Image (cartoon, coloured by chain):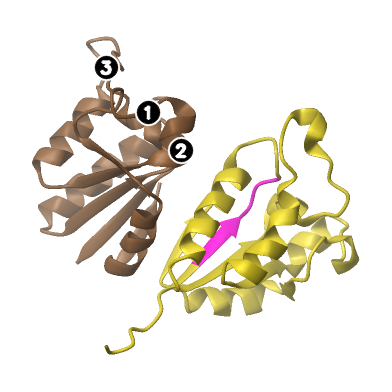
Amino acid sequence: MEEQEKTKVMFLCRKAPYGTIFEQEAIEAMVMFGAYEQDISVTFMDDGVFSLKKGQDPSLLGKKNFSKTYMILKDDFEISHLYVEKESLEERGLTEDDLITEVEILDRGALRKKMDEMKAFIPF
Amino acid sequence: MKLGVLIKDGPYMHQAMDSAYNFITAALEMGQEVEVFLYNDGVYNTCNFMDPPRDERHIANLLAELQTKGVRMVVCVAAGKRRGIVTNTVCSAGEISGLGQLLELCITSDRLVTF
């Protein structure tokens, strides 16, 4: 069978975690998409960068700690890249050391180039 | 051209479904093919029990109208179950299926447009 070119899809996570269901349902979609052997990447920007912050304990909210999921997504679910927008981190006083998992930090211009390669975006 | 339309907000509170309806209607008039995926609160647009005042637009009926024009409308099963949009509460225009359908839509459509 001829090998088909993989479709490039990027998730855009722009909302802080827990206050809305966006992060949780985004992760559900990432897990599902990861199973289909396409080229799936995830970008955290704006308040979405808070999703990766160390030391989260949402147990008092009756919610799961989703920040631990992203490592698993990359290792076990074939999510190819986790990008973080540099400016979004800086605007919120965060650095790479504040983040829970290894990510690729790109500035707005570099991220824009990555976005140009995408077939589709799933924004949250 | 095949257009994928992703709708992520519920009816009336947000304009997303109304804008999507106008977009889809215009696309169909131009002879384009459209397929819809409803995610997050977007699944509420397919609630079979909505009953707005008679002088207001009826969003579930707008979906039914799109369906008669050949638009497939997939409702995410996981998002639907969370919100009570299931087999016996979804309107006839909505087809409950999985998130895999959204990825399929990313692959098969020429453009994915999110509302």
Where does residue A123 sit, x and y in percent of width and height?
Answer: 52, 54
**Looking at the picture, does residue B87 appear above or below residue A25?**
above
Q: Position of residue A39 (x, y in %)?
A: 49, 75
Chain letter tied to yellow: A
User: Front-most of B110 and A64?
Assistant: A64
Tell me the residue at 82%/54% (across/down): A53
Rounded to the nearest whole Å, what is the CA distance between mark 1 and mark 2? 8 Å
Frontmost residue, A46 versus A61: A61
Chain ID at mark 3: B
Q: What residue type is labelled 3?
A: Glu
| Closer to the eye: label 3 or 2 | 2
Magenta part of the chain: A10-16
Name which residue type carries label 1: Ile
Pointers 3 and 1 in contact (C-beta within 8 Å): no
Which element type, helix, strand or loop, lies under badge 3? loop
Mark 3 or 1, closer to the camera? 1
Q: Residue at the spot x=54%, y=50% of the render?
A: A28
- The chain identifier of the residue carrying mark 2 reads B
Q: Mark 1 points at which residue?
A: B85
Residue B79 bears which disc, if any? Answer: 2
